[in-house]
Amino acid sequence: MAGKIQIGSFNLEWGAKKSATDTYDLKGTMAAMNAFGFHDNFSNEIVTEKRAHGLATVFTCINVRARTIASLPINVYREEGDQKNVTTDHPAYYPLAHEPNNYMSSANMFLSSMIHSDSWGNSIIGINRDLKERPTSFDLICPGEWDCTKSGGEAWYKINGEMYPSRDVLHFRWFSYDGLIGISPIRLNQIQFGKAFREERYSSMTLGQKPPGFLTYEGAQTPTQRAENQKSWSDDTQSGRTPLLSGKWGYTPLILSADQAAYIESSNMSDQKICGIFQMPPVFVQNYERATWANAEQSDLVYAKHTIAPICRIIEQECNMKLFTEKEKKNTYLKFNMGGLLRGDLQARAAYYTAMRNIGGLNGNEMRSMEEMNSYPGGDIMTVQGALIPIDQLREFYKNKVAPTDPGFKKAKKDKKKKVNGFNHAEHIN
């Protein structure tokens, strides 16, 4: 019997050497902790990814990030000369943008994939290919169903007992020490999440109750008096009444009350730190304490630039590396349409279209296409701000600004023309 175990840079081998398929890397699995969780060494709370989903702030952060990526349109572009056109005839387009397999849509696949990435630090999607090695469908692989190892300068994935080369696997990971295996942000920040669990436990324990403690009595009580006082205390506290006991009693709490412990401020601080871990503006987790209409737009901009754009870049490069042949990589690439973030903002979309139309960046038909509207004759003409004159007619337009009845008009036609910045302009008419 022979085998090999690799844990990071530590290697243990026994027996005869085997192929790469007999190499198992335990660096990314952490099987025991995945199964039983672990303690954060401070709050003594068990921290796991699924348990962290029960924290409202964590759930909202992961859910919002995942739904944003899932809602973005994704296109395959092909460069042909100076033109960059969306192509729908590439084999990877339809399964990736619409229907990756028979049991889920593209939006659902990316939604679940991002939940895996944001929770466990890794998301795995298997690529199914035809006889010509073209991608035909995709399968989402859940955490715990895969393992990864590096051998001979190439990454290998063991998925449900089968080995696959890295080119057949889309692997999205954010934070990683070696670039191969991502690290769970929840496990990496276990102290913060353990503290959040502790605060929730404290809140549940003290809600509507007097903090636990003990009663002291001056003197001695008979067993009957003791039983009556215990019953009176229990009945009164459960019904919300102030307990009335006979004799000289004193109460000593074992923990501080919620107001004394400044629970609300501590809880808010934990929520802010969790938002920071996932790079989420507070308003996106329904925290409007310091939100105003003036900074709402800035929050959207920060979210798009610093949270969503880096994620899109990682996904795009991973797909470009593994979905296209070496020949296709020269002029074919995949890209998210970040304009999809403006779908629910009519005012922002209108301002964007107006600005692009005024500088000749978009024509009417291009804007109608982005709004899924039919084109119209003449809508392909590019215009600029002003009278919205077609660009190729600007020279004729400005030449005709001199009226034919003007005495200088005939003189202007005879004037020698100069070529300035690529255009022929008549000399200045006095």
Image: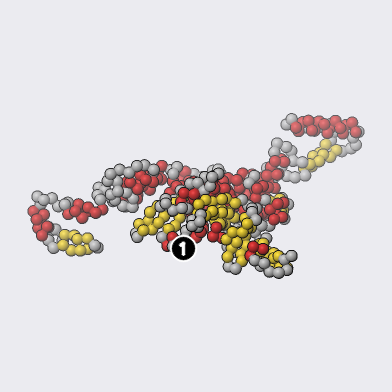
Observer-nearest of 320 and 30: 320
Q: Residue at x 9, y 55 (%)?
A: 410
Under tag 1, what secondary structure?
Answer: loop
Is residue 338 at all visible to an observer of this figure? no
Quadrant of the drawing holding the N terminus:
bottom right
Q: Residue at x 57, y 48 (%)?
A: 112
In the rendered structure, the answer to whether residue 2 lies left or right of residue 287 reads right
- Compared to residue 190, the image places residue 225 above or below, namely above
Disc 1 packing (10 Å; few <14; some 14–19; many ≥20): few
Residue 166 location, x and y as percent? 56, 60
Given the current orientation, which residue lies at the most extreme front position?
Answer: 131
Q: Residue at x 87, y 38 (%)?
A: 218
Quadrant of the drawing holding the C terminus:
bottom left
Observer-nearest of 80 and 54: 80
Type of amino acid under label 1: Glu
In the rendered structure, the answer to whether residue 173 lies left or right of residue 227 reads left
In the rendered structure, the answer to whether residue 153 lies left or right of residue 9 reads left
Residue 145 location, x and y as percent? 64, 53
**Number of labelled discs?**
1
Given the current orientation, which residue lies at the most extreme bottom position?
Answer: 16
Rendering colour mode? secondary structure
Residue 68 location, x and y as percent? 51, 47
Residue 374 location, x and y as percent? 34, 42
Q: Residue at x 73, y 68 (%)?
A: 15
Name the residue carrying label 1: 326
Observer-nearest of 12 and 418: 12
Is residue 328 at all visible to an observer of this figure? yes
